[in-house]
Amino acid sequence: MNKIDCAHLPPEVDYLVGIDGGGTTTRARVWHRSGVRVGEGRTGPSGLMQGHAQAWRHITQAIAQACDGRLQPDWRPVTPAHCALGLGLAGANHAPWVSHFLAADPGFARCVLRSDAQTALIGAHGGRPGALVILGTGAIALARDHDGRERWVSGWGFPSGDEGAGSDLGLRALRATQHALDGRGPSSALTDAVYRHCGGTAEALLAWGCRADQHAYASLAPLVFEHVADDPLAQALQAHALIQLEHLLVATNPDGRLPVVVVGGIAQRLLPLLPQELARQLVQPQGDALDGALTLCFSTETEPSHA
């Protein structure tokens, strides 16, 4: 989004803020009502499955980072009362998390929440029909048909869902490492790397697993791809992730008629391996999740749509 029309904002709103928050990072993009893009910030995770207090803390930190040293002298301070906030957050399809999060709103002039998949879909296709597959820390896919209906795939969350995503790969890699230590499975370069990453002793590995969350497991995923060239276990995990990506694409766009955008760190590793019949459906995104989140700033709704 190269420009934004703020002419019809309420007088108390000086800043439009788009937020993209997942299980690993939070990004903020801030515009001033004059049409000037202020800046962007990046902080820790704000997925609602990790708690609303953490989410609000990282959101406010990302906004502060986006604005630090970038305000013009005649602009008002970037306080919640002067901001319209559009949020795309992981976990916004679960009503109890949403209610706790919105109840803790620190006083934004406008606060509109959707799933990060919905805002990413809006941004990717400029609000037009299309499909989006996200395979990063977690996994979810969403399509909007020409009649306006939405179709959701995956998004069931860690640890029962997120197949093929970073958290899933990390969990599988840790399990294989535990099996190798027990003699229930073979040791490999990947299990050795996971062992070192988690502390290098059986006691440290146990402690790491006891405190690990979705984000922590996803931090093991890069080790999988680092060892794909010469480790059968890493190769098997990559093949598992590729199959899951293919399943997401087929389920989200069964007739192959919609343009599809695929995003996420794990997905980018796998795209060169996709079969041609799926790869030909893919298009480049017109915008990103922050562009989609910013469009919410012009809405007066607060309740998110649910899967």
Image: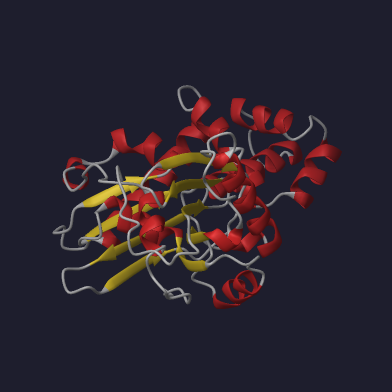
State the image coordinates of residue 92 (x, y, percent, origin top left).
Answer: 51, 67
Colour mapping used in the image: secondary structure
- Of all residues, the one furthest to the front in this rendering is 74
From where the camera sits, is residue 87 visible? no
State the image coordinates of residue 127 (x, y, percent, origin top left).
Answer: 25, 60
> Residue at 73% across / 28% down in the picture?
196
> Residue at 52% across / 45% down in the picture?
166
The C terminus lies in quadrant: bottom left
State the image coordinates of residue 212 (x, y, percent, origin top left).
Answer: 72, 49
Total residue callouts? 0
In front of the other: 45 or 131: 45
> Residue at 13% across / 59% down in the picture?
257
Q: Name above or below for residue 148 compared with residue 167.
A: below
From where the camera sits, is residue 202 visible? yes
Q: Quadrant of residue 65?
A: top right
Position of 281 with respect to 47 (left or right) is: left
Position of 270 with respect to 71 (left or right) is: left
State the image coordinates of residue 105 (x, y, percent, origin top left).
Answer: 63, 68
> Residue at 49% across / 53% down in the picture?
19
Q: Name above or below for residue 264 compared with residue 91.
A: above
- Of all residues, the one furthest to the right in this rendering is 203
